[in-house]
Image (spheres, rainbow, N blue to C red):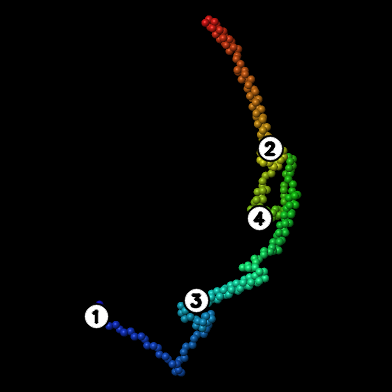
């Protein structure tokens, strides 16, 4: 502590004095006039904000500050307009509610929901769908399917109108939803691709199961079972005949030959003589 005091006394610090205040200069005829401000050109938006009377900024920091102020004022105006529009809409809703409650005596918080009305295009589409369905029914009534052993196969061909009606009917059957055209026609193609058979024995066109005849043709399930039973009966009869043919051979084999009978007779005679001697 003593050393620091001695060093401070030996090395005195210089005294710092404040600068003198500026002197007021009185402009007279002997001195020049004060400088005039620059003209307000190039930044007219700054004059609206009340900064520098529209004069250009003197530094980049000042320019950034003026830009931020302009952005703030612009968005403040937008928010103000939005709030004013919301207040107007709220006033309209309250007025409608008051009018509805005054005339109808209800306490609904909001007006009645709008009613959906079919447009002219939708009405035309509905009428077109009804006409298409009627044409489809008429075309289906005219179709005939050949049945019987000697009936000829008739190709079922629908006209363009009936085909369009079939598509609309499929859409209506799906619950009114829009079915993709590719999926719809793929389903129709699968239904048409199913083969149609006719029994070559009785001419039936439908059965629970189609079978193949010995000749390779399609037959119905009853005809197939009948052929199977007849085949089994034939196989059984053939087996019975073979057994009957084999039975006489076995009887012949069971009967003794002449030599065997002679040997047996001699053996019996010997046994009788032996018994008598004893």
Earlier in the chain: of badge 1 and badge 2, it is 1
Q: Which residue is mark 4?
A: 175
Mark 4 to mark 2 CA distance (whole Å): 40 Å
Residue 222: assigned label? 2
Give the label, 1 or 3, closer to the camera. 1
List the single residue furthest toward the bottom: 29
What SS does tag 1 mark? helix
State the image quarter where residue 275 is shown. Answer: top right
Name the foreground residue: 160 vs 226. Answer: 226
Q: How much space separates mark 2 and mark 3, taking CA atoms?
A: 96 Å
Q: Secondary structure at mark 4?
A: loop
Which residue is at 73% across, 45% downward? 145
Instruction: Identify the residue under disc 3.
Output: 68
Residue at 72 percent of width and 57 percent of height: 130
Give the label on residue 183, or none.
none
Q: Is residue 130 left or right of residue 48?
A: right
Quarter occupied by residue 117: bottom right
Foreground of the two, 69 or 212 = 69
Mark 1, residue position:
6
């Amino acid at each position: 502590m003593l050393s620091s005091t001695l060093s401070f006394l030996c090395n005195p610090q210089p005294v710092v004095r404040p600068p003198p205040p500026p002197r007021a200069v009185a402009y007279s005829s002997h001195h020049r006039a004060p400088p005039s401000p620059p003209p307000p050109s190039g930044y007219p938006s700054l004059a609206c904000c009340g900064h520098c009377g529209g004069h250009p900024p003197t530094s980049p920091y000042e320019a950034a500050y003026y830009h931020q102020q302009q952005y703030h004022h612009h968005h403040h105006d937008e928010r103000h307009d939005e709030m004013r529009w919301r207040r107007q809409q709220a006033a309209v809703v309250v007025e409608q509610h008051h009018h509805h409650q005054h005339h109808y005596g209800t306490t609904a918080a909001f007006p009645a929901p709008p009613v959906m009305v079919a447009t002219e295009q939708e009405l035309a589409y509905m009428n077109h769908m009804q006409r298409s369905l009627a044409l489809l029914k008429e075309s289906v009534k005219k179709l005939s399917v050949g049945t019987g052993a000697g009936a000829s196969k008739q190709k079922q061909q629908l006209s363009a109108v009936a085909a369009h009606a079939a598509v609309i009917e499929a859409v209506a059957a799906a619950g009114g939803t829009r079915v993709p055209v590719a999926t719809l026609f793929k389903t129709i193609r699968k239904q048409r691709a199913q083969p149609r058979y006719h029994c070559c024995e009785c001419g039936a066109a439908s059965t629970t199961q189609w079978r193949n005849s010995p000749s390779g043709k399609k037959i119905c399930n009853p005809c197939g079972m009948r052929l199977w039973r007849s085949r089994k009966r034939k196989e059984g009869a053939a087996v019975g005949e073979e057994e009957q043919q084999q039975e006489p051979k076995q009887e012949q084999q069971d009967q003794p030959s002449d030599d065997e009978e002679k040997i047996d007779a001699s053996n019996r005679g010997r046994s009788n003589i032996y018994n008598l001697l004893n």
